[in-house]
Amino acid sequence: MKYWLFLCLFFCSLGLYAQDIAADTTIYDVLEEMPRFPACEALDTTVAAKNTCAQQQLLAFVNKNIVYPVEARQLGAEGMVVVKFTVEKDGTLSNPSVLKNVDGGCGAEVLRVINLMNTIGVKWVPGKLKGEPVRANFTLPIRFRLAETPPFVMIEGDSIWTRVDTPLSFKEGTEALYEQLNSALKYPSSGIDSCLMGNIEVKIKVDRDASVEVLDMVDLNNLGFDFWYAATKVVTSTFGLWEVAEYEGQKVPSAFNVNLSFFPQEASCKEEVENYRQAMLLANEGSVKFDNEEQDLGIEQMTKALDLLPDNPEILLMRGQAYLDLNRFSEACSDLTKAQEVALVNWYDDILPMICKAKLIEEGDLEKKEDGN
């Protein structure tokens, strides 16, 4: 009888202990197993090795997503930002705060990246006490350092100077450049039947001898090869008409962006051209309103533009970025995905999966799918 009484007391005490741990709302600063970023859990190794790996992956995540604030760059601000946050039992993060800051908005930028983890559904491995998950504080130092960059960048194997003493310019001025380009630009006959229209942005390199070469071309309306050829032909015809950039007394290759507009002149396309111009006017007005803190009116204008041109990638990218700025991930995912499919641009390749994952979280679908698995 005493034996069974002993077993009952023993196991009952274990049950009460487990309940105490589960109900524990204490936030611990030191634990036998501290919380860690969930990037290395598949490794078949020790907890210490997982902690080391997780710390490296956490810093990689922060460095990939953090943006050095413009104000901090202008101030030349450098140093260490230290943030503290709580890893909850379910792996979410709460109570982020800055313990040590750097001028120019660096602390706020680190907090943005910490909050981003919750937004996109990153669940940490919680800290543990006696093998049970508990709430724990985590302190993270992030260094901001302004690296001395060279005066040039490499684009497709070419050195392009981005820091110059005398900037690249068209000899007769920018207005004369566009007058010449527009008068010489030929609309391809292959686009007439479909009334193809839109803009192509061309990045050119003007070399030391004033020769012109195309570095990159963005065809947001997917106009096609004939239009690319026409754009290349007209920009390279400006050979010798440039004042070449100079750096430390030497002529250097530099880049210049040219925006070319293609519109068919045939009467059969007149209505479609007017429709396009009206849509772009609405979209640009909406962009200005959005930038001037009239976000709802701005998006309303962009939506009206898309009512006129539902598949226009320029407007889809414009509205998608606006939704992204407002953390409206569902709409941002839809617009940006559609724009990339139509225009074949890769601007959002790195972050689009995270945006669309945040969309699923926002709609509750991700949790349902994970529960179903």
Image (cartoon, rainbow, N blue to C red):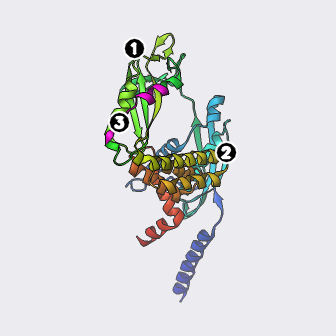
Q: Tell me if residue 251 comes above or below residue 292 in the rendering.
A: above
Q: Amino acid at mark 2?
A: Asn
Q: Residue furthest top?
A: 249
276 or 199, nearer to the observer: 276
Residue located at (37% from left, 43% from top): 223
Q: Is residue 39 visible?
A: no
Taking depth in this image into account, of 28 and 373 the one nearest to the observer is 373
Q: CA distance from mark 1 to mark 3?
A: 24 Å
Residue wearing tag 2: 292
Residue visible at 34% across and 47% down in the picture: 193
Q: Earlier in the sequence, mark 1 or mark 3?
A: 1
Q: CA distance from mark 1 to mark 2?
A: 43 Å
The span shown in magenta is 178-189
Badge 3 marks a residue whose secondary structure is helix
Q: Are marks 2 and 3 in contact (CB under 8 Å)?
A: no
Q: Which mark is residue 209?
A: 1
Q: Residue at x 45, y 43 (%)?
A: 347
